[in-house]
Amino acid sequence: ADVGGIGMGLVRMVRPWDEWLIVWGYDINQPPPEVTPELATSVARQLVGDPALEIELLGANTWTVNNCFATHMQKGRVFIMGDAAHRHPPSNGLGSNTSIQDGFNLAWKLAKVVKGQAGVGLLDSFSAERAPIARQIVTRANQSIAEFGPIFEALGMDGGVDHDKIHRNMEARADATPVAEAQREALRKAIAFKKYEFDAHGVEMNQRYASGAVVTDGQGEPPFEKDRELHYAPTTWPGARLPHVWVFERSGRKVSTLDLCGHGEFTLLTGIGGEAWVAAAETVGAELGLPIRSHVIGPRRAIEDHTGDWAGAREIRDNGCLIVRPDHHVAWRSETLAADPAAELRRVLKSVLAR
């Protein structure tokens, strides 16, 4: 197509099947184009491949790739989140989920402060936890944009506007020549490298918070054994996201460990021999005016671990415990039963909640 400088554009469905978004480039050294219905129709016809296509132009504007993130997300009583705190291209699909994570992080903290269950110091942890994530995802999204370069190079689309040359270079990859074979190999490698955009689970899941709303008690952060951008590394290290594991109610219904937690409350997870933690949670929760949900996971308990997957993921002993925040991040853990469980929970929760 004779659009976008490099001869290509983007057609994205907005609403099935009659509303579409079309994006193409223009020379940023020149004034922005005036997108008339005639120009929009011409572009749509070229990209769709139908010279008789008729369209209804709903709107047009210019857009540029953003590379912006906030280094601090709070000033007094004012907080920012979502696109106000991190603006980036749509690469990796990080926009909505990162914005929701911001809201999930801040909402429970505001609620605890407003209800008098936490001190205002808890709110300082929002920026401490989420600003590094803003930097991370903006950097990754823009890096993914740049990583399209090898694909364009392999196709002979070097950013010029000589469309005849572009067509010749793209057609050449079908030739039975050593040069064409090398071009095909380069294209395969360039596409495979895009796993950092399309399969980067670690970017979305490996958030490990460090703030006053987390108590590690000196436990060192576990290393990433695989590429931390590509692979999610589940851990119950304080500050990390609680791992999802399927467990079972006595009725046989399968539930996720994530479903056992959240819902605006702190949750204590322990196993057989950790019942003293449950009693301590009731005592300390009553003292602090803070509801704490508790689950004992094990054979013939209300929640059972038939497959042993939870035992393999929890990184504590049967009589240890995890304290999980309302946003599904681990606030604290104890490998075994403490000598004074109530004193430990009281210490940890007062620290986390800035009491």
Image: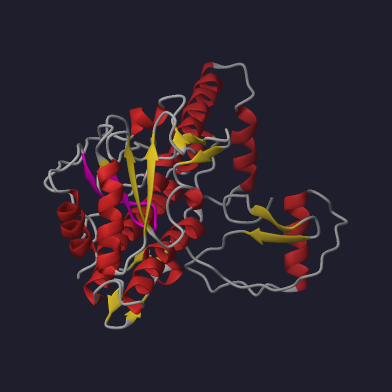
Task: Examine the rendered structure and indicate whether residue 171 appears above or below residue 324.
Answer: above
Q: Residue at x 48, y 35 (%)?
A: 247
Secondary structure that dominates the magenta span? strand
Report if residue 208 is visible in the image.
no
Q: Is residue 59 left or right of residue 340?
A: right
Magenta segment includes 308? no
Start and end of the magenta stretch? 322-334
Q: Position of residue 13 (x, y in %)?
A: 71, 55
Q: Position of residue 159 (x, y in %)?
A: 51, 49
Looking at the image, which is closer to me, 350 or 109?
350
Task: Examine the rendered structure and indicate whether residue 219 appears above or below residue 310.
Answer: below
Query: What is the quadrant of residue 266 in the picture?
Result: bottom left
Query: What is the quadrant of residue 128 in the picture?
Result: bottom left
Looking at the image, what colour scheme do you see?
A: secondary structure
Looking at the image, which is closer to me, 303 or 204?
303
Q: Is residue 124 left or right of residue 181?
A: left
Query: What is the quadrant of residue 322 in the picture?
Result: top left
Furthest residue to the bottom? Answer: 77
Looking at the image, which is closer to me, 12 or 98?
98
Task: Examine the rendered structure and indicate whether residue 248 appears above or below residue 122.
Answer: above
Magenta segment includes 324? yes
Q: Is residue 164 left or right of residue 122?
A: right
Q: Residue at x 32, y 58 (%)?
A: 135
Q: Is residue 25 left or right of residue 116?
A: right
Q: Position of residue 295 (x, y in %)?
A: 39, 45
